[in-house]
Image (cartoon, rainbow, N blue to C red):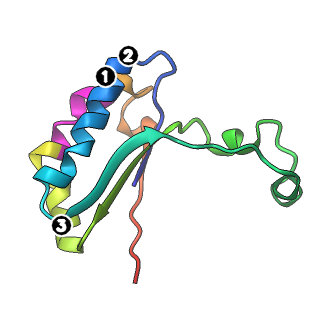
């Protein structure tokens, strides 16, 4: 998974192109089961959350720290995930990412993996 900081004035056509490229991962990357880029859903903070996390003026949006899109991928195995890392389809996203992110990868992307079981 990856959280992205996308410019507020990013070209919608470039965002769509990145989304389309990622959607193709399931067809071109062996072992990629799911792949999507979408706006990060940030719900309103309810009373219980305010009591738990503090009365943040910006609520969950403030907690998102400027990340506003998510790259969500699911792989059938660790081997498939490793193939993705260097695969040309993954590397082919660089032009779109550099055009829509607020800066370079170190300030615009938070990447993490989750293993279940």
Q: CA distance from mark 1 to mark 3?
A: 27 Å
Where's the C terminus, which quadrant? bottom left
Instruction: Return the x and y of residue 56 as percentages of the image width and height.
Output: 82, 43
Question: What's the mark number on residue 14?
Answer: 1
User: Disc 1 or 3, which lies upstream in sequence?
Assistant: 1
| Image: 82 above or below 116 | above
Q: Which residues are magenta?
A: 90-98
Q: CA distance from mark 1 to mark 2?
A: 5 Å
Q: Residue at x 81, y 56 (%)?
A: 49
Q: Residue at x 24, y 71 (%)?
A: 76
Q: Which residue matches tag 2?
A: 11
Residue 80 position by quadrant: bottom left
Q: Which residue matches tag 3?
A: 80
Where's the N terminus, which quadrant? bottom left
Instruction: Return the x and y of residue 19 as percentages of the image width and height.
Output: 31, 36
Q: Is residue 92 magenta?
A: yes
Q: CA distance from mark 2 to mark 3?
A: 31 Å
User: Disc 2 or 3, which lies upstream in sequence?
Assistant: 2
Residue 94 position by quadrant: top left
State yes or no: discs 1 and 3 in contact (Cβ < 8 Å): no
State yes or no: discs 1 and 2 in contact (Cβ < 8 Å): yes
**Classed neighbour count for the residue bearing mark 3: other residues with Cα under 10 Å, few (<14), some (14–19), many (≥20):** some
Is 12 positioned to the left or the right of 67 in the image?
left
Q: Secondary structure at mark 2?
A: loop
Q: Is residue 52 magenta?
A: no
Q: Residue at x 41, y 27 (%)?
A: 103
Q: Residue at x 88, y 52 (%)?
A: 47
């Amino acid at each position: 998974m990856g959280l992205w900081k996308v410019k507020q004035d990013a070209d919608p056509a470039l965002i769509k192109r990145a989304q389309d490229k990622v959607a193709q991962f399931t067809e071109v990357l062996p072992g990629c089961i799911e792949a999507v880029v979408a706006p990060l859903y940030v719900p309103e903070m309810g009373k219980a959350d305010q009591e738990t996390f503090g009365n943040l003026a910006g609520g969950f949006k403030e907690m998102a720290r400027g990340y506003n899109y998510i790259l969500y991928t699911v792989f059938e195995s660790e081997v498939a995930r490793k193939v993705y890392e260097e695969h040309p389809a993954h590397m082919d996203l660089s032009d779109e990412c550099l055009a829509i992110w607020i800066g370079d990868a170190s300030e615009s992307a938070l990447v993490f993996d989750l293993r279940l079981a």
